[in-house]
Image: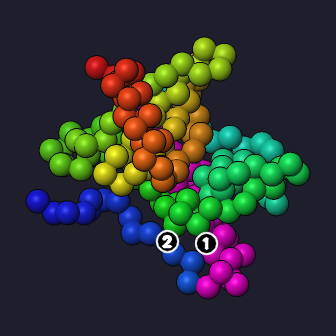
Amino acid sequence: MNNECLWLPPLKRCEDLNKYAEYEDELYEIFKRDFINNQIYFESKVLRIRKHPITYGREEAFYHIICKDLLKNRDRTPDIARCERIEWPRKIIDNCKCDNNCIWCSKIKIYKKIFKNNNYRYHILFEEYSYIVIVEERKEYMLFITGYVIDEDNEMDKKLKDFGNYKIT
């Protein structure tokens, strides 16, 4: 067995943080390719992104996927670990329910929990890579919420407990 998932893209590293603006432009092009220019489905519904508020000409979902903390003025601080994994959410969504006997796909854990306004949020947990993607179910579509690295053991423990309690059968 290969020790690395073959369909999961390599990290998109920023070689020079002094050129972060160019790096962010590159990340945005990937985001547009994966979530705006090419249609994606989850649970047989089209997946959409949160567009508003538009900040610096970019959709809210983009900043949510590359940044961790929302600041008081609605600006966000980029999180390099999130940035480096910009291509992961789409690939995980595409492969989380594949049935081609891929050992890595079979390790993805999916559970759903009720969220605000009685909407369900699907949590797509790739434990081996400490990464989670969150998608919210709406009446007519699915809404991409975010994807991020789980960087604390207690947070992973909580996600695994949630999987045990809310897994989809």
Residue type, numbered disc 2: Lys
The span shown in magenta is 16-44
Indicate the position of residue 15 as horizontal and vertical percent values.
56, 84
Q: Nearer the viewer, mark 2 or mark 1?
A: 2
Which secondary structure, mark 2?
loop
Is 43 included in the stretch rendered in magenta? yes
- Tag shown at residue 26: 1
Indicate the position of residue 153 as horizontal and vertical percent values.
42, 47
Is 68 included in the stretch rendered in magenta? no
Mark 2 and 1 residues: CB-CB less than 8 Å, in contact? yes
- Tag shown at residue 110: none
Residue in the image at 37% along x and 34% along y? 160
Residue type, numbered disc 1: Glu
Above or below residue 30? Residue 37 is above
Above or below residue 18? Residue 47 is above
Q: Main secondary structure of the magenta part?
A: helix
Residue at the limit of the structure toward the front, as seen here = 154
